[in-house]
Image (cartoon, helix red, strand yellow):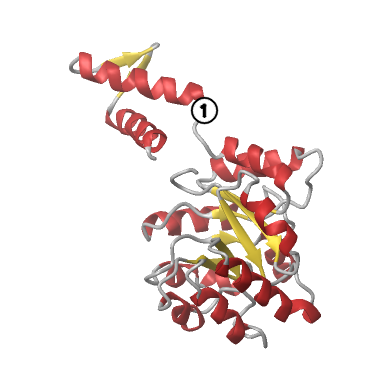
Amino acid sequence: MAAVQRSFLFVPGDRPERFTKALNSGADAVIIDLEDAVTVGNKQLARQNALAFFASQQQAWVRINAVDTPWYSEDLNVIRHAGCLGVLLPKAEDTSKIHPLTTLGKPVLPIIETARGVLNVRAIAALNGVQRLVFGTLDFSLDTGMADDEKTLIAVRTELALVSRVAELLPPVDGVTTEFRQNTLTASSARHASEMGFGGKLCIHPSQIALVNEIFSYSAEEIRWAQDIVHLSESAFGALNHNGLMVDKPVLEKAKKILAHHLLP
């Protein structure tokens, strides 16, 4: 598993036969979904399935229902179980509603998916217990009327990346791509998010996982470059150049960062 989780795979809470398959899919994190993937009539069943799964000594993340829904209070019982690794909170837009979750001792990933959530994201990111931000692109597009594409949402992704850095959170997680057969859109979306400073992506199908993991990892070429830069700095003094390009302190620090991330267990 990667030191920083790159791929987050949703599995519907009312489909327990998929839980173990999801754990074996290669995803860095599996999210048992009690929210959008579950119909109103199956909410209680989904909670029971998650609790039974945790009782069998298995672990996963959980996406609960939003604070203002009738299912939220009972969803908290699932979070409290030792098998729950952390919680994703949809419609995260008010610190007063997020704070109670941070007292449960589990990492909280607020899903920023409304205009109000974006406007309050700095305060949200500053809450103790918030580990990283998640951009819920589909619901954000629905809420704002803005197109769900790379160009239109670039300002929002920039805000989430900058806020995460200033708050010293892990890099944010990008939203789902609904295509899961050809995965050309998945690849394009993941690459764009990676270039924007995001560190992972929500997935809806196992076919997306290997691609997402690859895109949000340093390539072999990048690792070799970093090794060359660090070796050069150890064997030379003063101004350095690598293949005709100047190597200054920021370049060296970037190389060290790549190698440190690559060597993490």
Which residue corresponds to the image point at 69% horizontal and 39% vertical from the top-left? 188
Residue 124 visible in this rendered orientation of the protein? yes
Q: Nearer the viewer, residue 56 or 236?
A: 56
Residue at 65% x, 43% y: name it: 209
- What residue does disc 1 label? 219
Residue at the extreme top of the image, as rendered: 243
**Dot 1 lies on which element?**
loop
The three-letter amino acid code for the residue at tag 1 is: Ser
Residue 202 visible in rendering: no
What percent of the width, then of the height, locates residue 150?
67, 48
In the rendered view, tell whether residue 51 sits above or below residue 258: below
Residue 203 lies, in percent from the top left, at 67, 52
Write the residue at 69% across / 51% down. 21
Lateral position of residue 59 relative to residue 163, left or right = right
Q: Quadrant of residue 34?
A: bottom right
Determine the residue located farthest toward the left in the rendered image: 237
**Residue in the foreground of this view, choosing between 261 and 232:** 261
Q: How packed is label 1: few (under 14 Cα within 10 Å), some, or many (20 or more)?
A: few
Q: x%, y% of residue 113?
A: 63, 67
Residue 123: x and y in percent read 43, 72
The residue lying toward the viewer, choosing from 3 and 112, is: 3
189 left or right of 226?
A: right
The residue positioned farthest toward the front in the image shown: 56
Residue at 43% x, 67% y: name it: 130
Quadrant of residue 163 within the rendered picture: bottom left
Note whether 205 is above or below 142 in the view shown.
above
In the rendered image, the quadrant that contains the C terminus is top left
